[in-house]
Amino acid sequence: MIVHDIRPLLAPTISILCAILIFWRGENTYLRRIFSISAAILKWVIVLSMLPGSLKGVIYVTELIPFTPGISFLLRVDALGMFFGMVSSTLWIITTVYAIGYMEGEHARKRFFAFFALCVSTTVGLAFAGNLFTLFVFYEMLTVSTYPLVIHEETPEAMKAGRKYLVYTLTGGSLILFATALVFYQANTVAFDQPGILSINSGVGILVVIFAMFMLGFGVKAAIMPLHGWLPSAMVAPTPVSALLHAVAVVKAGVFGITRVVYNIFGVSLLKEMASKGADVASVLMWAAMITIVLGSLMALMQDGFKKRLAYSTISQLSYIVLGVSLLTPDSVMGGIVHIVNQAFMKITMFFVAGAIYKKTHKKNISEMHGIGHKMPITMATFTIASFGMMGLPPTAGFISKWYLSLGALAADKPIAVIVLLLSSFLNAIYFLPIVYRAYFMKPLDGDTTMDEAHWTFLVPCIICALYTIGLGLFAELPFVPLELSRIAVTQFFR
């Protein structure tokens, strides 16, 4: 059932208004905090109010500007959009609290929090995009709003990383725009209202070109190798930005776009028909994802920098989602979609911990973290929980993702994908468990074992996200949890 509603527009608008207010009165620390937290909570309430309807199959629509027949600025909240919107709005509240503590005493806080709000606004707008045109607009707005966050430190290294980020993402955006134009030329629409709008009658050749351009364009932000180069470089940004990039906004925009293209633009039937004619583009995407999963993990093993190791882990973990999408089975897609939220909570916990350790000890490298678990036991406990989740150990959220991905791979008769997932879990253990061992089973280099935990603005977000990591695994089958919403999205894709 389609319901015309103003809430799909209100959700991203709240953050835009927050950014305007911060630009206007953001020099006042008290007002800046009030604006940021109030807008985060209000956005979450608006998005949450649509959840009961989404679970019943209701689709909320707001159409603003019809440009030509078939193209309009359209906001449309279906199950997949609601899924991504809930992740973004929930984590924005937690990350805002963390950022307030982290940025205390830092320079240009007004600019930081204003663009921080704009970043989340564009992410929710992207989640609620009802067609390729609207998705492209928010996708490029996301690039523009995150650039000032990436270069926030304004060091030569930060400026270089910012330039690299723009070159990668704007090039990807250009490919998406061109592919969108080709889709409209072939289908006379770019809407996400059905499971596939293209037809084999367009010709296999042009369909392969369109698919390739979309995968390259969205693959940049999804960090599919070798399009990943910007992501490790962007780790020069403040930790709240790194957390936002890796768990909520930019990288998830990439995998979200890939999911939309595969299931709303091409559709399962067309991709299988293309495969029967010798153009198995879904399998090519599957192999790209599997290679990225393994190589990302191997690169993570080589990093001593804490955030760099987490960055390469993200590159690997993101391709779990791409792998699930490319296998074209209901279980695999459900595993991929639910990993959007599972990876978000696990990875943001890890970045929160990295930031808390840096703020408390000024240590950035893993080799310096002897005995940090003695000084910051609760902080490191949350990291340990997130590590177990990344390895896919029950009862964490990561187990749920890998379980459904494995079921989907077997249903698709692709046992190689299960082997890759098992190998990835093994590699995750190799590069995460030594951090835990170093923290708890080695003495601090200075011999001081006095407990000295991080400030509550660091500690509480870590604890909340770690609890989510366990809760999303233990209670995965309860109503109103991500797995239920992902099932509805899959039903809409395979109807």
Image: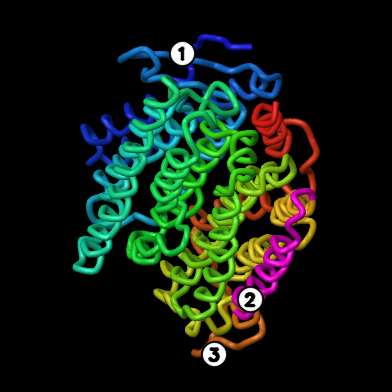
In terms of sequence position, does the residue under pointer 1 or pointer 2 come before the other?
1
On the image, the x and y values in percent for residue 492 come to 66, 27
Image: magenta residue range:
411-434
Observer-side mark, 3 or 1, equals 1
Magenta stretch: dominant SS? helix
| Residue at x-position 63% and y-position 24% | 51
Observer-side mark, 3 or 2, equals 2
Observer-side mark, 1 or 2, equals 1
Snapshot quadrant of residue 177: top left
Where's the N terminus, which quadrant? top right
265 and 277: which one is in front? 277
- Tell whether position 231 is magenta: no
196 and 386: which one is in front? 196
Q: What SS does tag 2 mark?
A: helix
The disc placed on residue 436 is: 2
On the image, the x and y values in percent for residue 262 come to 55, 39
Q: What SS does tag 3 mark?
A: loop
**Whole-number angstrom distance, CA of label 1 to CA of label 2:** 47 Å
Where's the C terminus, which quadrant? top right
Badge 3 is on which residue? 447
User: In the displayed structure, does residue 436 sit left or right of residue 445?
Assistant: right
Structure colour scheme: rainbow
On the image, the x and y values in percent for residue 384 come to 66, 67
Q: Which amino acid is tagged 1?
A: Ile
User: In the displayed structure, does residue 209 sit left or right of residue 165?
Assistant: right
Badge 1 is on which residue? 6
Q: Which amino acid is tagged 3?
A: Gly
Q: Are marks 3 and 1 in contact (CB under 8 Å)?
A: no
- Tell whether position 422 is magenta: yes
